[in-house]
Image (cartoon, rainbow, N blue to C red):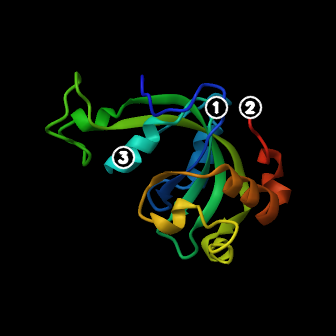
């Protein structure tokens, strides 16, 4: 998609994508990914215009924290990689879908997906309660704390590096400074 607000090709960006664990968890993603090394999951159901715009800025190769929400202890449960840039969400055209949008047309879709692939499921999730300890310092620019309802959000480089380097280096260290 041609969007002047998107960064230049080659600069990896970081995001956080949320999923309710009772709808689609990182375990579901891991099971689906086990079907083959090239399994890509459409990240669908985004119905917030701000989240849609963030999603449309995602490029192939960008990384995102997989956030599990609607659970006793929400947090980062994995890392996914964007494998396909924004494309129309087919559910907006399907009358039987809870995501049907009568105003959307194939010529002018309103809602989009990106496809992602699981890169890593964390054995030790980075929980919200642990992130909050750093909310006023290292993670002060993290949209998670200022726009908590946003289901797809950017993660500033410094916040990504802090989480990967300081909060769970054993499992996330491989993504530290991953700036292809």
Secondary element under disc 2, as helix, strand or loop, is loop
Q: Residues within 10 Å of mark 3 (few under 14, many from 20)?
A: some
- Residue at label 2? 180
Where is the C terminus found, in terms of image quarters? top right
Left or right: 180 as drawn, with respect to 140 = right
Residue 128 appears anywhere in the view: yes
Mark 1 or mark 3, whichever is nearer to me: 1
Tell me where residue 69 appears, x and y as whole percent: 50, 65
Q: CA distance from mark 2 to mark 3?
A: 29 Å
Residue 138 position (above or below residue 101): below
**Badge 2 or badge 3: first in the primary sequence:** 3
Tell me where residue 129 appears, x and y as whole percent: 63, 77
- Please name the residue shown 23% across and 27% down the image: 108
**Badge 1 or badge 3: first in the primary sequence:** 3
- Please name the residue shown 83% across and 52% down the image: 173
Mark 1 or mark 2, whichever is nearer to me: 2
* Camera-side residue of 4 and 119: 4
- Residue at label 3? 45
Left or right: 129 as drawn, with respect to 103 = right
Mark 2 or mark 3, whichever is nearer to me: 2
Q: Residues within 10 Å of mark 2 (few under 14, many from 20)?
A: few
Left or right: 107 as drawn, with respect to 84 = left
- Please name the residue shown 68% across and 30% down the image: 37
**Badge 1 or badge 2: first in the primary sequence:** 1
Q: CA distance from mark 1 to mark 2?
A: 8 Å
- Residue at label 1? 61
């Amino acid at each position: 998609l041609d969007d002047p607000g998107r960064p230049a090709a080659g600069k990896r960006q970081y995001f956080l994508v949320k999923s309710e664990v009772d709808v689609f968890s990182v375990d579901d993603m891991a099971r689906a990914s086990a079907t083959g090394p090239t399994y890509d999951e459409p990240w669908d159901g985004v119905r917030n215009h701000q989240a849609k715009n963030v999603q449309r800025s995602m490029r192939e190769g960008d990384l995102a924290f997989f956030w599990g929400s609607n659970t006793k202890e929400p947090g980062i449960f994995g890392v996914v990689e964007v494998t396909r840039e924004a494309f129309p969400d087919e559910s907006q055209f399907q009358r039987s879908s809870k995501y049907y949008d009568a105003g959307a047309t194939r010529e002018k879709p309103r809602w989009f997906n990106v496809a992602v692939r699981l890169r890593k499921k964390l054995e030790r999730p980075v929980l919200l309660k642990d992130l909050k300890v750093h909310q006023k310092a290292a993670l002060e620019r993290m949209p998670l704390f200022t726009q908590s309802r946003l289901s797809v959000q950017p993660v500033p480089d410094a916040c990504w590096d802090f989480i990967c380097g300081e909060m769970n280096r054993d499992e996330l260290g491989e993504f530290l400074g991953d700036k292809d």
